[in-house]
Amino acid sequence: MNAPFKPADAAATSFVRRHIGPSPRDIAAMLETVGAASLGALMAETLPSTIRQEAPLTLGRALSETEALAHMGQLAAQNLCFTSLIGQGYSGTILPAVIQRNILENPAWYTAYTPYQPEISQGRLEALFNFQTMICDLTGLDVANASLLDEATAAAEAMALAERTAQAKTKSKTKSDTKSFFVDHEVHPQTLAVLRTRAEPLGWTLIIGDPLVDLAQADVFGGILQYPGTSGAVRDLRPAIAALHGKGAIAIVAADLLALALLASPGELGADIAIGSAQRFGVPMGYGGPHAAYMAVRDALKRSLPGRIVGLSVDCRGMPAYRLALQTREQHIRREKATSNICTAQVLLAVIASMYAVYHGPEGLSQIARDVHRRTAVLAAGLRKLGFARACDAFFDSVTVDVGNQRDAIVARALAEKINLRLGEGTLGIALDETTTPEIVEAVWRAFGGRLAYAEVAATAHEALPSELKRTSRFLTHPVFHAHRSETEMLRYMRKLSDRDLALDRAMIPLGSCTMKLNATTEMIPLTWPQFATLHPFAPREQANGYHALFARLEQWLCQITGYDAISLQPNSGAQGEYAGLLAIRAYHASRGEAHRRVCLIPSSAHGTNPASAHMAGMDVVVVGCDARGDVDVDDLRAKADAHAKNLAAVMITYPSTHGVFEEHIGAICAIVHGHGGQVYLDGANLNAQVGLARPGDYGADVSHLNLHKTFCIPHGGGGPGMGPIGVRAHLAPFLPAHPATSQPAASQAEIDRGTAQAVGPVSAAPFGSASILTISYIYMLLMGGDGLTRATEVAILNANYVAARLDAHFPVLYRNAKGRVAHECIVDPRGLKQASGVTVDDIAKRLIDYGFHAPTMSFPVPGTLMIEPTESESKAELDRFCDAMIAIRREIAAIEGGRFTVEASPLRHAPHTVHDIADEGWARAYSRAEGCFPEKTSRTDKYWSPVGRVDNVHGDRNLVCACPPVTDYAQAAE
């Protein structure tokens, strides 16, 4: 490792050099600062020798950007762009070009981080607030969250919410707590499969049937109803909802958002919860994702709502300001008692869906819905003329027809027309969308054996929406959905919002454990190519050969990088990966007749999703302490492993630790757990410190999730999308998640009941999760090659040690290894300064905004501290700018300590400063305007201005507002 870096060729050099921030000269200077003779010497002092991998990564020759795009073009050509009329919750859609160019393809939006610092996230928070308003209006419910991962997992989250509500009710009653949940036989198949996966570890039974017939005898805590049904049927669900309420159960409706432009809302039908997907609001299918799911609830359930909620509060001047509200990041507080393990959202996709609504407005959405329904009615009328009976008379955009033994012949003719239909037993389903043209309808008729003219059939076709279910209530009444009809106004609105945010395109985002690195433009380009963007996740496999070639090679590379034997690409977030990995461990134990192994050891320093995921997988969490150096207390681990030996299922450990150190005893930890029959789950959040240097599968781990949105360059997108595939050793491979849409079947309920199931059920709606964004990580690895990936890891570790070296005298570095080194991140400790001056970690974070920076991670894993991860993509100049800002803030703290002003009168407590401070008529503060608004060494020309002052979090939680006020409020205000 002491040899100088030698890339495969000159072409590769250009990209590796552009991805890695510091130049060779900078690296030499930084090594001198940290006191290391070379990168190799620094790695030797940072990683335990016992975990170092021997062979270098050999991923093939690194490609140039031009070569990589040419290669992606070859893969794309292997995907066939058929017209998929499969439906099942996925629809063709038209993404307005102004949104594609200025949101999806704009780094101001896709490089932003989760809006935990609200003052510098006002743009995306407003867009998410619009999303919530859109969902509340269309569903007719009171409170919506800022998106979930997909419709199937949103259904599972709603089921869990219903169970919690029922549990709370029964605590005050003598009635026994039922553990059964009703599932409409008309839910989408993938939703049913995910519900089965989620219910089984928790001991819940699913009752599947016709809600209008079978609910009467069912004793359930809740039920989910599909609206319209997966077959296309539009049914009046009010009797079923009333039946659920009569049992004291929660009524959940999975609703198609576009259909709700014409149909009575779930809230009007009496539903307690509505869930679904916003995919058809401008978000390409992408062979399964990413897409924004939604959940809305009546007001009484708002404090149990999983995921994130954007609320409206006020800033220090009393001006409106958005923020994340209520249970945001509750996992770190409630841990295994958290209502969900979901730590992320689909922010970028929710923003796109909200902008689609802003672009079209209620009139536009209604017209699209009417056009889709009209074409479906014409399609159905033509099929009737051809002698095919449909399953129901009332429908919105989908019909299912009985074709008997003609199915295969019809499918063959449809494929000849480049059309995919939904296959059933003697039936075919046809789902139309906004991309469907009269020519496509005529092609479907030809597949069914007839040649009809669209115009002639349309002349006599009638709509098929029940009059009693037609929507009469208004929606999207807020001015934002009416004010941006011209492209000029739309363009300016999106620009205005992006200008309010601080994303990676403006400055370093030094968040620990989040790995905010370069998302190179070349990596993003193929994402919107039709061959990747328009494929339906349930299209025939042979139409997605390019995707599957990419999957196979990506899995091979990830196996080589991690030392694991098999990879599942299905989990579409890190939390889903944790859950899938623990399910695999659980199924493995069950297959060996040891289903009683349910204890999961988790260090006290672990990310909150770890215990939450363990609870969801039916495990019992036992907390292991950490020692003074931040390492896992091996003696405590051994004692608890001994105490729970018969029931030990697993340990969950993050490596390097969340304290930013490679623990020397990782091998011993793995050996202790294995010696007691348990499995080692290694959280892959910090894999960016290991690629090319160490492989979890080699030093004792059995399974890891791999955050592709961290280590492998998928953008955070303001808090989502993400991907969290899992790698496993060979003995766990049979237990990777299956999917009903693939050749590998999910376990049946009977197999689960018998304990003979092998593969666990799906954890995501689509077989390969958010498949389209896998192209990003794939291109990143193409461009870097094995040597480049290794060099990236080394420089990430160098950058962290450089920051630690520069800041330690001013903000002590809390944890280091025995040789004084940190891994890829470090924790600095200002807690002593709070005691001496009153300055809090919040004050430092908000003051950094005045210097043009996003704050590091606050108070995790140690309350009152800052965790900094610079990544390999930040240059020495940017690292120095950040360190200079931190040191300048320390001098400001010294001024408080020296008595120049109190903390309440200091620039830190008033931060962030806004243009309102500059424009104040009077200035009565103890420091000058220049000190407050233009702190040391900040550029007046290029300064980022926070759009709001410090946000009042308490006010926002006490006065929860999470949707735009009704338009009548504006009228009253005007009067």
Image (cartoon, grey):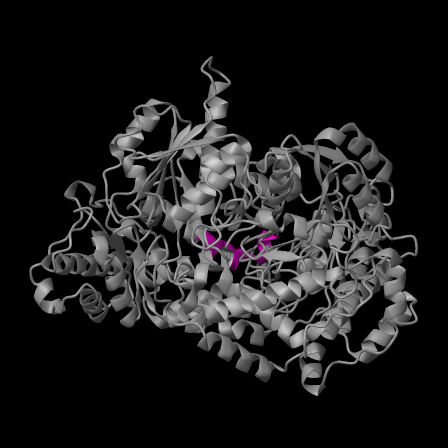
* Badge count: 0
Across and down, in percent, residue 764 comes to 49, 50
Residue occupying the far top of the picture: 174
**15 or 399, nearer to the observer:** 399
Residue 124 is one of the magenta-drawn residues: yes
- Residue 382 in sight here: yes
Q: Is residue 843 above or below residue 596?
A: below
Start-end of magenta stretch: 117-129
- Residue at the bottom extreme, as displayed: 10
Q: Quadrant of the N terminus?
A: bottom right
User: Is residue 892 rendered to the left or right of residue 346?
Assistant: right
Residues 295 and 442: in front is 442
Q: Residue at x 52, y 47 (%)?
A: 763
Q: Is residue 376 left or right of residue 922?
A: left
On the image, the x and y values in percent for residue 250 come to 39, 30
The image quarter in which residue 484 lies:
bottom left
Membership of 873 in magenta stretch: no
- The overriding secondary structure of the stretch rendered in magenta is helix
Residue 34 lies in what quarter of the image? bottom right
Residue at 52% x, 51% y: name it.
Answer: 345
Instruction: Between residue 551 and residue 117, name the one nearer to us.
Output: 551
From this view, report whether residue 316 is shown above or below residue 185.
below
Q: Position of residue 948 (x, y in %)?
A: 56, 55
Say whether residue 925 is visible.
no
Q: Identify the residue at horizontal 47%, vertical 50% (top origin).
A: 739
Q: Which x, y percent locates residue 639? A: 83, 31
Left or right of 481 on screen, residue 101:
right
